[in-house]
Image (tube, coloured by chain):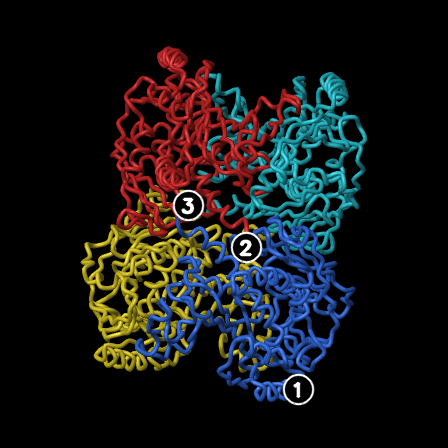
Chain colours: A blue, B yellow, C red, D cyan
């Protein structure tokens, strides 16, 4: 009930605090017989880890996954897969000042109001570290989706107001291009400008927001449960549940507000012995059910709230106005790092709906 | 599992097809002791009903709600509240042609692919008529929220590219203004232009998209369950699950992608013996938990897919390209009619989280 | 959350009070394509209805089911199936005296303590009438199970201390024998003695308890989800949730407490190219998963609490000891009438687990 | 979906195999602010551990719990509590022979049929070791229940046909007496005979079944959700989901089948300014809702299936009849060891329903 579980059939429960002993996830409902190795999971955790580039913090997090259950002789057994990543000894003293002074743009104040108590060290449960469990579980989901020919790719399309122009390329080429630069943008020219802008903003002690697009290819028509567990409904929840996301779009998204019906509707065509769609403004989903076209989502990511400038807040202990300055190194932009997390969340939704679909027909 | 249920504690199950005998909803988990009458529900159903204005279809739907259980001597008993609205005899013959020819922008094709069978008459389960259950259940949720001083208002902020300028007015005044015109826009000048644009587009046999904003006032700090059942996550799912919605924003929403951290963060202030926020770019939610400020959501609504123009599609029976022209009267724009539905969905999320929050602390 | 829903994939929500306008159920998650007619459901409701025999009350309840959604041209569409049965105008005045005086052995007192309010007329939601929804939904589940060759039969094995001796007959023969007498006992001699004992007890204004056995044949090996949603766990909950049931047994059941391991274990044998079991003391379930042998459950049913004798209770309004005498005709024994309800509950569990099993393997 | 989660608000997910690296549990939904230490959990794990007495196996399992999340400065924070117990290096070679030869009375065959693959070492997920997670989570639930004055005690009432005679003593005295002997029976004379019988049966290479009673005191009236999530329904599932349990009774249980209504009904009395019950044949539950009287459950536990005698089975690899002899030390009776597990399961159900009840009324 307290919300740390996601998915109906392929379901995960994450746990752990930023400065606690470990973070982890239990994957329940993965079908038996899936070949999977620690490396499959580690690969995604490595993509999630902050690197050494200017676009991300220089903190070193070696996130080595341990598989504690559910896999036997290289295959899933159908029992829960417990994954754990140990936290490195963290110096929590930098957070002492924040105990009573909620950081603007963070969950400090709201956790305190909700529970009356919180682990304030490193953001506790509300830290970006919580996404370790999502990415580890997502790696299992991706492995499963690959069995069915489904692939998911995300990349940055906008950062600090600079927009990428996407070349008309295959998804896997976009991915290769995106992964080749520190901002994970498939438009090399835009990427270079994004990096310059990031560097400038970092020097000001400030941060930038941006947009990330997630595309899933190979999704068969028919996924998604009307009327509340629509595929786009579940994707919206999955993506909005990632910290810093403030908007979710499907297909034409926000833009559809300015279109006419004759401009928005995707005509159906008959091709290769089956129906498909001439365009994909629907983003691969109609009536909450997949059309067979690529699923296209977009998320707006707010600028990193931890900025190296004095900010106004309150002291909850004394009941007075206060000021804080957040120390330490923080990513000046979240979008590049959110890419593998967003992919993971989409993978979890699709894996779940692939299994749910098995019960749809007699 | 097949997705017709929404909510964890305050939960609803909707049922019914457009041209079947009835549509309805079972509300399970409403606390006992709530005073509620059929009029409370009827009032919202009347707001949902298509009116006679140019902004909506002229079909006459008298949607009289019947309460079949769960209320005794004017109060809820804690048992399920079953609500039913009978469908009028509909002429389904206009839909015969659509049996094998999926309408572009509709769920015809995807339902067929999912289930291998569908009630094609009037869109079946994927009809806008499905929202009757949402609105009826939402009326119960609203009644409950009123007990706690929570009010929800929605209105159209953009239609066919025309944007409203919101006056700095109280929420209830915005509501009164919005409800006074056929496009439900609180900016009278914009409303007039929207209506003109609608009329022009209708004559072209086309339709328009738009934006709707939903605001909830009086929501206490602390609602929302980290990390997956975040309040914004649940709102995103609730709103995206309404047909025609293609984007959901919270607070600054899409705009945050272009802001700096110093521009986005809301400073905390100490006021009247408690903490609050100087601005509300967060839209009332931080880390997935309510801040005590108004909850602000926005949705992008696509143009009505049923347009009076020939459209290209396929004939699934013959496996050939085909053309269809959709007969009958259809709203040339969905946003005005989606207003009470969006309010209902937000009410359902908030009622559920109010009850969930009761279990948060010892 | 408030407990009126059962099942994960094949799931039902029941609603309605004894003296309200109607009772009903929404079946969500039934696969599309199942051929089903109102008669399939009516047949089971007729079995549930109190008859004219001495073993059951003489009240006339014509329970005509109406299908309001989810079935199109004789087949399920995958959307929710809404079923309603209207209540006849009931005279509630006989219950006026019970408003403040809880009947011993009934839920009057506990509903009042839980909700602070209750519909006292005819037992409200806690009436045996609530089982209409279970039986109607169970009829859909049975129809589905028949597609897979699964059949469920229940019968009375003990009443008022009289135990049936089961002949070594095929399940369907046991059923025919059981349905041929008013106590639904497949042993004709025992049935006759049960009826005599019932008549004697009825004259004393008293009632009798008994045992009912439920057998499911054709269940494939592999159903049931370890470790909490074990097949026997879900069956135990399903059966214990029927009013008046005070014990649930699987296979050898209670008797196993007195056996040795060498007496209890069922040896495996190789037969017809596959493994099976020489005996079935396990009742068709090992480790919570079906073995392929018949599923065998037994329930102990308490004597009807409504007896025509003065009983001691309290008056909650005045806070004093009180006495009540329950008027009206009541079944002097519940087991014969619980038979179709128990079958329905087992059907619901098996239909759900058949669908859940589809997600078990890659 | 795959069934490793239990509870709606206070919910747990267990994971782990007998011979894997560890077993564990994630407790989600425990309210914030509860004081709890590792010792509180360790105490219950120690009670679960096989001892050195003749009544239990001599294997040494030092089950040291580690708390990985959810507790900060000695109190729960409302975030998930992750608990892990590492497995000792086990010699799995003894199980090599069992890979293709399912042990009678065990889940070997059914897991294989369900998943097509299984970790056969030490019973894998179907091992009694799986209860470590239940007991650890149950310790958290018990701590919570103590805050509300609820206490749970279980003890053996029958073993190998020997029945205890319960003295009319307070529950805590029964508990002290039960915990003072190796069979956990509160009747010292019966306990002595049980031990002798156990010793005799052990020498024969055989095992014994028995009965365990679980009593919860201090449970307020009003817990339990009609109509499917009845308190007794949830208890039945919770207890039946423990390996080796074949029957669950509430209050008079199986015995009620032989009683008359006038013998079964508990009269209500007015006492100390409130209503209560003169007797408690209902076992503290009416209509699925607690009455305020002690909750009384009983379970029938089958004899240990692992016996030191040759048993007939099949070889799934060769498709032939086979014989197995199970090596190693196994408890000749499960009831004494199931006591803390049964207490844990009842605690989990009650903690969950205490929190669910908070949402019952306006």
Question: Where does the image place residue D11, in percent across and percent down from the top left?
Answer: 59, 47
Q: Which is nearer the eye, C17 or A114?
A: C17
Residue A105 appears in the picture as rendered: yes
Do marks 1 and 2 both belong to one polypeptide chain? yes
Residue A95's disc is: none
> Quick check: D157 above or below A76?
above
**Residue pointed to by mark 2:** A10
Q: CA distance from mark 1 to mark 3?
A: 59 Å
Look at the numbered discs 3 and 2 and tell me whether their residues touch, using CB distance below 8 Å: no
Chain hosting mark 1? A
Q: Which of the numbered marks, if any, corresponds to residue A199? A: 1
Cα gap from disc 3 to disc 2, whole angstroms: 38 Å
Q: Are marks 1 and 2 in contact (CB under 8 Å)?
A: no
- Name the side, left or right, on which C311 lies relative to A51: left
Q: Chain of mark 2?
A: A
Alpha carbon distance from label 1 to label 2: 41 Å
Mark 1 / mark 2, whichever is N-terminal: 2
Residue C336 percent coordinates (x, y): 38, 23
* Along the viewing direction, whichever of A338 and C358 lies nearer the viewer: C358
Please, what secondary structure does the residue beneath circle 3 have? loop
Q: Nearer the viewer, residue A321 or A332?
A: A332
At a point 26% along the width and 62% down the height, the residue shown is B49
Image vertical order of residue B347 relative to residue C301, above or below: below
In the image: residue B87, left or right of residue C271:
left
Q: Is residue D258 above or below residue D144?
A: above
Q: Position of residue D151 (x, y in %)?
A: 65, 35
- Please tell me whether mark 2 sits on a helix, a strand or a loop: loop
The residue labelled by disc 3 is: B33
Between disc 1 and disc 2, the foreground one is 2
Q: Quadrant of residue C153?
A: top left
């Amino acid at each position: 009930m307290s919300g740390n579980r996601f998915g109906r059939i392929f379901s995960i429960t994450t746990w752990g605090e930023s400065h606690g002993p470990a973070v982890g996830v239990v994957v329940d409902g993965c079908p038996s017989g899936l070949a999977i190795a620690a490396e499959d999971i580690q690969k995604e955790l490595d993509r999630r880890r902050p690197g050494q580039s200017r676009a991300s913090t220089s903190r070193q997090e070696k996130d080595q996954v341990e598989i504690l259950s559910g896999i036997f002789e290289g295959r899933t057994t159908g029992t829960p897969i417990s994954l754990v990543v140990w936290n490195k000894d963290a110096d929590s003293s930098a957070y002492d000042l924040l105990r009573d002074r909620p950081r603007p743009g963070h969950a400090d104040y709201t956790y305190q109001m909700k529970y009356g108590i919180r682990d304030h060290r490193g953001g506790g449960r509300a830290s970006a570290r919580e996404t370790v469990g999502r990415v580890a579980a997502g790696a299992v989901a991706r492995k499963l989706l690959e069995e069915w020919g489904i692939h998911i790719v995300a990349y940055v399309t906008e950062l600090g107001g600079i927009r990428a122009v996407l070349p008309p390329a295959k998804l896997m080429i976009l991915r290769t291009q995106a992964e080749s630069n520190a901002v994970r943008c498939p438009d090399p020219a835009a990427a270079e400008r994004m990096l310059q802008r990031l560097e400038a903003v970092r020097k000001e002690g400030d941060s930038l927001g941006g947009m990330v697009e997630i595309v899933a290819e190979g999704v068969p028509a028919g996924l998604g449960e009307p009327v509340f567990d629509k595929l786009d409904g579940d994707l919206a929840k999955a993506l909005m549940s990632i910290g810093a996301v403030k908007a979710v779009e499907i297909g034409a998204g926000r833009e559809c507000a300015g279109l006419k019906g004759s401009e928005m509707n995707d005509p159906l065509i008959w091709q290769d012995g089956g129906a498909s769609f001439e365009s994909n403004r629907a983003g691969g989903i109609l009536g909450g059910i997949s059309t067979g076209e690529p699923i296209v989502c977009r998320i707006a990511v707010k600028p990193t709230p931890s900025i190296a400038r004095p900010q106004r807040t309150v002291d909850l202990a004394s009941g007075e106005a206060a000021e804080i300055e957040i120390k330490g190194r923080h990513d000046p932009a979240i979008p590049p790092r959110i890419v593998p997390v967003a992919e993971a969340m989409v993978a979890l939704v699709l894996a779940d709906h692939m299994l749910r679909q098995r019960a749809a027909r007699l």
